[in-house]
Amino acid sequence: QVQLQESGPGLVKPSETLSLTCTVSGGSINNYYWSWIRQPPGKGLEWIGYIFSRGSINYNPSLKSRVTMSVDTPKNQFSLKLRSVTAADTAVYYCARPIADYSSGGAWGSWGQGTLVTVSS
Amino acid sequence: DIQMTQSPSSLSASVGDRVSITCRASQSISSFLNWYQQKPGKAPKLLIDAASSLQSGVPSRFSGSGSGTDFTLTISSLQPEDFATYYCQQSYSTPLTFGGGTKVEI
């Protein structure tokens, strides 16, 4: 069964760049659309974007100007960078995989445990 | 963007109750609608995809219905482990969007 694990700093200063990596184990990264989703404390879920294993990308327009996603197929990892962060970017960040390969639309059946990133000086 | 509106935002219920949560899309999304359950401190868990397809391992007391703009998640007999927050999510078009959530409380 595939497992996902987010990693990265838990504290980022305002105006700096948030960087997270999701490591996929128990399955291949190939042929899936890998998403990042975040959840501010006590609030709802927001889709940040996805990257396909071969590199095609789709970002949420609300974050598009600040987001970069990348994939490292040999390492079975994909990454998120969010630039110029503010306190509003404080959230639990999840990586997720859909239940079906080649499916870009969500129906995320596998999730990482989530990592809390706090933006504060 | 497609807006997803859930109602109610919270509800109080008892073990054994039948509970229904509705989700309305701002435009037709056919059956591209998924339901998740989230417990405190945990990642969301996919319950239902494509509006009515129950995921493997999810109890049969959960069911989903609807198409177009109006959808419903029903729990036929609420169990103690079902107290959680439920989210709908549309997978019709990007940006992929969620409803605001429904917290099911005792």
Image (cartoon, coloured by chain):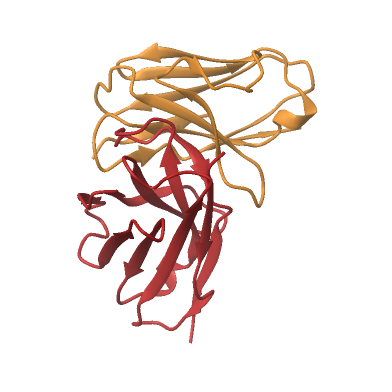
Q: Residue at x 55, y 62 (%)?
A: A115
Q: Is residue A7 above or below residue B18?
A: below
x, y percentage for residue A51? 28, 51
> Which residue extends farthest front?
A74
Residue B60 in the figure: left or right of residue A20 = right
Asked if A43 appears above or below B79 in the picture, the reply is below
Please tell me which residue lies in front, B47 or A99: A99
**Where on the picture, by quarter, is residue B32?**
top left
Point 79% across, 29% down: residue: B80
Asked whether A119 or A18 is in front, the reply is: A18
Task: Decide which of B18, A102 is in the foreground and name it.
Answer: A102
Residue A41 is left or right of residue B95, and the answer is right
| Colour chosen for chain A | red
**Total marks in image:** 0
* Quadrant location, the N terminus of chain A: top right
Q: Residue at x 46, y 40 (%)?
A: B100
Q: Colour of chain B?
A: orange
Residue A79 left/right relative to B18: left
Give the x, y percent position of residue B49: 44, 23
- In the rendered structure, the answer to whether residue A121 lies left or right of residue B31 reads right
Q: Position of residue B95 (x, y in %)?
A: 26, 43
Q: Residue at x 30, y 49 (%)?
A: A50
**Residue at the bottom extreme?**
A121
Residue B91: quadrant of the picture? top left
